[in-house]
Amino acid sequence: MYYIFSLIAPTISYIAVGSLVPPEWYFITRWAAWLLYFVCIPLVVFKTAYWADITAVLTVATLAFAISCLAAALSLLVPSRTYPASAKAVLFGYFNIGWFGIPIAQAIFGSPGAIVMTAAYMGGVIFGATLGIYLVASTRYRPAQSVIKVAQTPAFYALLLGFLLKGRVELSIVDSAIFDMAKILLSFLGMALIGAATRRYAQSMKNFGSLLSFLLARLFVSISSVAFVLIAAFNLSLIGAQEASILSLIAVFPIAANVVVIAEALKTDAENLVAALTVSTLIAFILVSVFAAAFYIF
């Protein structure tokens, strides 16, 4: 249990650091969002795609992508006066697998957990670089304009380039400090951006009761989506019992922090997205602690 909390602690500290940024220093968060959107995220996405295990992409990553798509589709059944359909879809379907999920899976299941969840992260990367960006853009732009926004996104081309060069070109630079620094900045600035945005949009937390109800509905949809996909995959012998147990963690993962990064970069209305992301992260901390305690007890 202590090990799990030690993994969560840095994330909490990054959010806390970001919350120290005064609202009037808004330009700092804009610069951070720009750096993440145009530099850090593309580099991390490229490396993930370049080193991706094709077998894992065809199995575990595909299942993770299917879970995201199913959750996004089911979100349309959840009524909300605050969030339009596209916002609900991205909030329900875009899970924080990379920054939150991989360390947690490793803490609970050891090395197998990290391996399986890293493969699932690839599915999340594909969802985020395509449908995730489109859905966030759709909160402000028309469908055709949203498609153009996806086509203008560096992460989309980084994903394609990584897959294209994999196995064809040896790139020693992929293991260089540049990519490691991009990953570190992505973790720190991504979570700090949540803290800064939460402070700036504190008034969006006024309707906490309705927000909590919305996120509990998200949790129910997440559990249903994960259960449906994993049960089907297990019955079809696509995954084993251990892989199913590890992937079941996705049901309690929070909303991906990249939602805020994308919203800030595309200059869409990030206020309500930030509120949902922040509270979902707090809920996830609690649920993972309960999950971990149950795992160690039983």
Image (cartoon, rainbow, N blue to C red):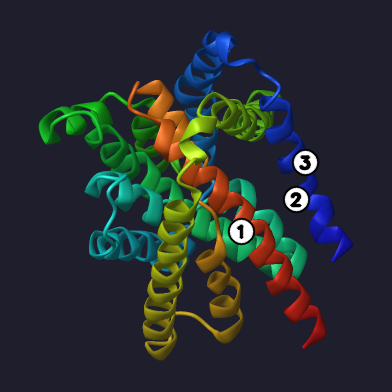
**Residue picked out by circle 2:** 8
Q: Quadrant of the N terminus?
A: bottom right
Q: Residue 45's mark?
A: none
User: Nearest the camera: 30 or 102?
Assistant: 30
Q: Quick one: label 1 or label 2, which is nearer the N terminus?
A: 2
Q: Position of residue 214 (x, y in %)?
A: 40, 58
User: Nearest the camera: 75 or 56?
Assistant: 75
Three-letter amino acid code of the residue under disc 1: Ala
Three-letter amino acid code of the residue under disc 2: Ile
**Residue picked out by circle 3:** 10
Q: What separation in Å lies between label 1 and label 3 (alpha carbons)?
A: 15 Å
Q: Is the residue marked by circle 2 packed among few (<14), some (14-19), or many (20+) residues within 10 Å?
A: some
Q: Position of residue 225 (x, y in %)?
A: 38, 72
Q: Residue 284's mark?
A: 1
1 or 2: mark nearer the eye: 1
Position of residue 127 in the picture relative to residue 190 (left or right): left
User: Nearest the camera: 204 or 9?
Assistant: 204
Q: Secondary structure at mark 2?
A: helix
- Residue at x 40% of width, y 30% of height: 270
Q: Secondary structure at mark 3?
A: helix
Q: Quick one: label 1 or label 3, which is nearer the N terminus?
A: 3
Q: Are marks 3 and 2 in contact (CB under 8 Å)?
A: yes
Q: What separation in Å lies between label 1 and label 2 (alpha carbons)?
A: 11 Å
User: Nearest the camera: 251 or 128?
Assistant: 251
Q: Is the residue marked by circle 1 packed among few (<14), some (14-19), or many (20+) residues within 10 Å?
A: some
Q: Secondary structure at mark 1?
A: helix
Q: Position of residue 297 (x, y in %)?
A: 81, 84
Residue 196 makes an appearance in the image: yes
Q: Position of residue 127 (x, y in %)?
A: 36, 49
Q: Is the residue marked by circle 3 packed among few (<14), some (14-19), or many (20+) residues within 10 Å?
A: some
